[in-house]
C-alpha cells in the first residue's frame, strides 16, 4: 500500500476512510456517499482541510481546544516527558512526578476542599469512576442501599455503558442495553423548549424541585448522588434559570446527597471562572474533568474529590483504575496547558473582556428572522431557530432538518458551528480575538440568511406547534 499522507488527493483519503474507519455518532453509509471532510492542520482558531479551505472553529474541536490550536509548548512538554519517562502506572503503591504535580495544581485551582484527584483517560471514564466511587462511599459508610444516582434527561456525561447511562439521551439509551440499573432521570431546566407560560424563575424552581420529588418517590435513604453539568453542553448549551442551581444545592444539602458537577465542558475557563461551579455558586463533592484540562493536546480526564469522600475511599481499597490513569505524558501536557491558561491570563480575559464582547455581538443575531433568541454565558452561545419566535415554536418538519441545513451553510462559508436539533451552538477557543468574534458572527448571519432562503423555498417555515 502507498504511504497515506496529507498529500494524497481528498477523494482517495475519503475512500480509504470509508473503507476502514468507523466514525463515532455517524451514519457510515451516508458519510461514504458524501465523503468525510479531511482536516489536515490547524492554528489558533482556524482549521484547514485537505482542499485548502479554512474554517473558523467555533466549537473548539469538541469543546476542548481552550488555548487554541498550534501551540508548541504542549508538544515540547510531551516530548520531554516521553524521553524521560514515557509511561509508568500509578497502581500498586507507585507514582510519578507529572501525576503528583498535576494533582497538586488541580487541588490549588479547584474551589473549597476539592483537594484529591482520581485520574482517567477521558470524561466518560471519569464518570464511570464517579458511579463506582459514590456507591462505594455510601456502602463504606454502612448504607449499601443508598445507591441510586439521579441525573437529567438530555444530559451528556459520556458514551461508555456507565456514563451513557448517567446521560439522558434517549437515542443513546436505545442502543446496547442502557441505562444500567439504579440511574434515574428528571427533566432538564430547558426554558426555551419546555417553559410554557411560566416565568423562567418559576420554571427553574419547578425543575429543581423535581429532584426533591424524585428523592421522596425513590426513598430518602436510597439516593446516593445527583450529577449535572452546570450548563448542559451537548444537549444544546442550556443555561438554567437563575433559580435552578440554588434550589438544587439546598435539596442536596438537606437530603445528604452527594453532588457531582460534570465540569468536562464548563471547566478550565469556559464560563470566565476556572470552573462552572464557581459561576453558579455550586458546592460539589466531586467534579468531573476532561476536555479543557489538556485543551485536547492529549487525552486525559479525572475526578476532583472533596476531603470527606476521599477520606472514606482512601480507607478501603477502591478496586478501580485505568492503565492510563495519570498517564505521565498526558499529565505533563495538561500541566503545561494549565500554566498557559493561568500565566497568559486567558481565563481572566474571558471574564474581564471576551465574554462580554461575545455576548454583545452574538445578541445581534436575535434580529435575524430565523432566530428565537441569542444567548451566551462565558464563551458558549446558543441560538434556537424557529419559524415563530414570539411563540417559541418549533418547525413543522422533522426536528433538526433546519439545524442541519444551517450547519451545512456554515461549513460552506468557513464556519464550524454545531446543531443540536434546530438549535445552533458555539463554544470557541477561549483565545478567540475580537476581530475573530466579528468574523464568526458575520459568517453565522450569512449562513442564517442562506438557511432562511432555502427553508422558505422548500416550504419549511411552518410552525409545528
Ligand atoms: C464530552 C463530555 C463527556 C465525555 O467526555 P469524553 O472525553 O468524550 O469521554 C462527559 N461529560 C460532558 C459534560 C461532556 O461534554
Image: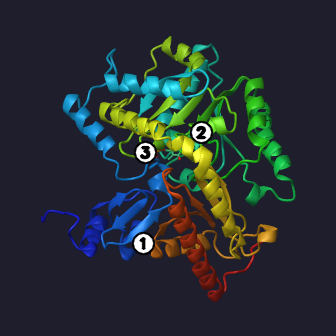
Q: Which residue has dot 2 on it? A: 273
Q: Is residue 153 above or below residue 119?
A: below
Of the pair 422 and 243, the residue shown nearer to us: 243
On residue 30, the disc is 1
Around disc 1, counting alpha carbons within 10 Å, would you say few (fewer than 14), some (14 to 19), or many (20 or more)? few
Q: Secondary structure at mark 2?
A: loop
Label 1 C-beta lies within 8 Å of the nearest ligand 1 atom: no
Q: Secondary structure at mark 3?
A: loop
- Residue 204 image point, x, y percent: 79, 46
Regarding residue 70, the answer to whether it shows in the image is yes
Around disc 3, counting alpha carbons within 10 Å, would you say few (fewer than 14), some (14 to 19), or many (20 or more)? many
**Which quadrant of the figure contains the C terminus?**
bottom right
Q: Is residue 335 left or right of residue 182?
A: left
Q: Which residue has dot 3 on it? A: 295
Q: Secondary structure at mark 1?
A: helix
The residue under the point 41% across, 39% down is: 337
For the residues bearing labels 3 and 1, Cβ distance under 8 angstroms: no
Around disc 2, counting alpha carbons within 10 Å, would you say few (fewer than 14), some (14 to 19), or many (20 or more)? some
Mark 3 to mark 2: distance in Å? 16 Å
Q: Is residue 208 left or right of residue 319?
A: right
- Residue 414 image point, x, y percent: 45, 71
Marked residue nearer the N-terminal end (3 or 2): 2
Q: Is residue 267 above or below residue 306?
A: below
Amino acid at each position: 500500500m502507498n504511504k497515506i499522507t496529507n498529500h494524497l488527493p481528498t477523494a482517495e483519503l475519503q475512500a480509504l476512510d470509508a473503507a476502514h474507519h468507523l466514525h463515532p455518532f455517524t451514519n457510515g453509509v451516508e458519510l461514504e456517499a458524501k465523503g468525510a471532510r479531511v482536516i489536515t492542520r490547524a492554528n489558533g482558531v482556524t482549521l484547514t482541510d485537505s482542499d485548502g479551505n479554512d474554517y473558523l472553529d467555533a466549537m473548539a474541536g469538541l469543546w476542548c481546544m481552550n488555548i487554541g490550536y498550534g501551540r508548541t509548548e504542549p508538544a515540547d512538554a510531551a516530548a520531554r516527558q516521553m524521553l524521560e519517562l514515557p509511561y509508568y502506572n500509578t497502581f500498586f503503591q507507585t507514582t510519578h512526578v507529572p501525576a503528583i504535580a498535576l494533582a497538586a495544581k488541580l487541588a490549588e485551582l479547584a474551589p473549597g476542599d476539592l483537594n484529591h484527584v482520581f485520574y482517567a483517560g477521558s470524561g466518560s471514564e471519569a464518570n464511570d469512576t464517579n458511579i463506582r466511587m459514590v456507591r462505594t462511599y455510601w456502602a463504606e459508610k454502612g448504607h449499601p442501599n443508598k445507591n441510586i444516582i439521579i441525573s437529567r434527561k438530555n444530559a451528556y456525561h459520556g458514551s461508555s455503558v456507565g456514563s451513557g447511562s448517567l446521560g439522558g439521551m434517549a437515542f443513546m439509551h436505545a442502543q446496547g442495553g442502557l441505562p444500567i440499573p439504579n440511574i434515574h432521570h428528571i427533566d432538564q431546566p430547558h426554558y426555551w423548549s419546555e417553559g410554557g407560560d411560566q416565568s423562567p424563575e418559576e420554571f427553574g424552581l419547578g425543575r429543581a424541585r423535581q429532584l426533591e420529588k424524585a428523592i421522596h418517590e425513590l426513598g430518602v435513604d436510597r439516593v446516593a448522588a445527583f450529577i449535572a453539568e452546570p450548563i448542559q453542553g451537548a444537549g444544546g448549551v442550556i443555561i438554567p434559570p437563575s433559580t435552578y442551581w440554588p434550589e438544587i444545592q439546598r435539596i442536596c444539602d438537606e437530603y445528604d446527597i452527594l453532588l457531582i458537577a460534570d465540569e468536562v465542558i464548563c471547566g478550565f475557563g469556559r464560563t470566565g471562572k476556572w470552573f462552572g461551579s464557581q459561576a453558579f455558586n455550586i458546592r460539589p463533592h466531586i467534579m468531573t474533568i476532561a476536555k479543557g484540562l489538556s485543551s485536547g493536546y492529549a487525552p486525559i480526564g479525572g475526578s476532583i474529590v472533596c476531603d470527606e469522600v476521599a477520606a472514606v475511599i482512601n480507607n478501603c481499597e477502591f478496586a478501580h483504575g485505568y492503565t492510563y490513569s495519570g498517564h505521565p505524558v498526558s499529565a505533563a501536557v495538561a500541566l503545561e496547558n494549565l500554566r498557559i491558561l493561568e500565566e497568559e491570563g486567558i481565563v481572566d480575559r474571558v471574564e474581564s473582556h471576551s465574554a462580554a464582547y461575545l455576548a454583545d455581538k452574538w445578541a445581534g443575531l436575535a434580529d435575524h428572522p430565523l432566530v428565537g433568541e441569542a444567548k451566551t454565558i462565558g464563551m458558549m452561545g446558543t441560538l434556537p431557530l424557529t419559524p415563530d419566535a414570539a411563540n417559541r415554536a418549533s418547525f413543522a418538519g422533522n426536528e433538526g432538518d433546519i439545524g442541519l441545513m444551517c450547519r451545512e451553510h456554515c461549513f460552506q462559508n468557513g464556519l464550524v458551528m454545531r446543531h443540536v436539533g434546530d438549535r445552533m451552538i458555539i463554544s470557541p477557543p477561549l483565545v478567540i480575538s475580537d476581530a475573530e468574534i466579528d468574523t464568526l458572527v458575520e459568517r453565522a448571519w450569512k449562513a442564517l440568511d442562506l438557511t432562511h432562503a432555502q427553508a422558505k423555498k422548500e416550504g419549511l417555515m411552518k410552525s409545528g406547534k
